[in-house]
Image (cartoon, coloured by chain):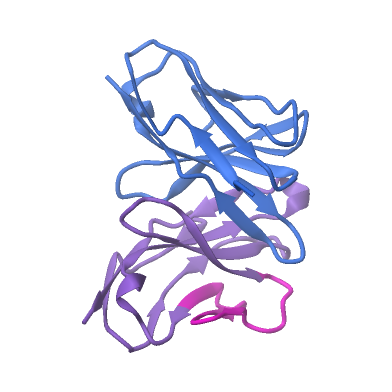
Chain colours: A blue, B purple
Amino acid sequence: NAGVTQTPKFRILKIGQSMTLQCTQDMNHNYMYWYRQDPGMGLKLIYYSVGAGITDKGEVPNGYNVSRSTTEDFPLRLELAAPSQTSVYFCASHRQSPQETQYFGPGTRLLVL
Amino acid sequence: AQKITQTQPGMFVQEKEAVTLDCTYDTSDPSYGLFWYKQPSSGEMIFLIYQGSYDQQNATEGRYSLNFQKARKSANLVISASQLGDSAMYFCAMREPLYTGNQFYFGTGTSLTVIP
């Protein structure tokens, strides 16, 4: 199993550009999450999904959009990139049983200039 | 109010000694989950241990144990027999109830350095 994969690993964007961060999991988990981690900080939840077709906002959703058309894929869309979106982005899938566990992707480092 | 508080920005421990990393949380819901993660300098997030709010016993996973004190709203991570490879950032997190949205909150982390 590959677990959770994210692409790209690193990207530089110009202010105002848009991009999609890809996230795929092969564990058949219903719950998936997008976080951002600013330097020296913990993770903040951007969006999450409890299953295909169902998404909801987290703590910091402004400037982002998500979709969940399949169980496997949970892309994060940045529209009109701003320097404040410079961060490391982590996607995670969540196993609920037999014990709750979150599996993280390797992260995407985004720089907006 | 902060949902998760980690008050120790940095900790040092001698190799082979035990260390406790503090975490307090804030929620009024009776059903929640508590998690600890390790983030080495390479940047990946590694799940360590989970404690459910209704679990009667403290969770253990190998050298990791979670000292869960519900009345005090604390969920401290204990690492026994520290190894050099334990040097990393450690994050505490809380999942709010699934029926209210399943939101996750992370603390600001504790940097652990294991001294040979």
Along the horizontal axis of the image, is A95 left or right of A62?
A: right
Along the horizontal axis of the image, is B84 left or right of B35?
A: left
Q: Residue furthest front?
A: A1
Q: Name the residue: 33% across, 13% down.
A: A15
Instruction: Give the x, y percent position of residue B58.
Output: 62, 82
Along the horizontal axis of the image, is A94 left or right of A28?
A: left
**Magenta residues?**
B52-77
Q: Name the residue: 64% across, 49% down.
A: A1
Q: Name the residue: 49% across, 15% down.
A: A79
Q: Is residue B116 visible?
A: yes
Numbered marks: total? 0
Q: Quadrant of the C terminus of chain A?
A: top left
Q: Name the residue: 51% across, 36% down.
A: A6
> Which image quadrant for residue A22?
top right
Observer-nearest of A4 and A63: A4
Q: As displayed, is residue A94 above or below residue A58?
A: below
- Residue B82 counted in the magenta span: no
Instruction: Give the x, y percent position of residue A5.
Output: 55, 39
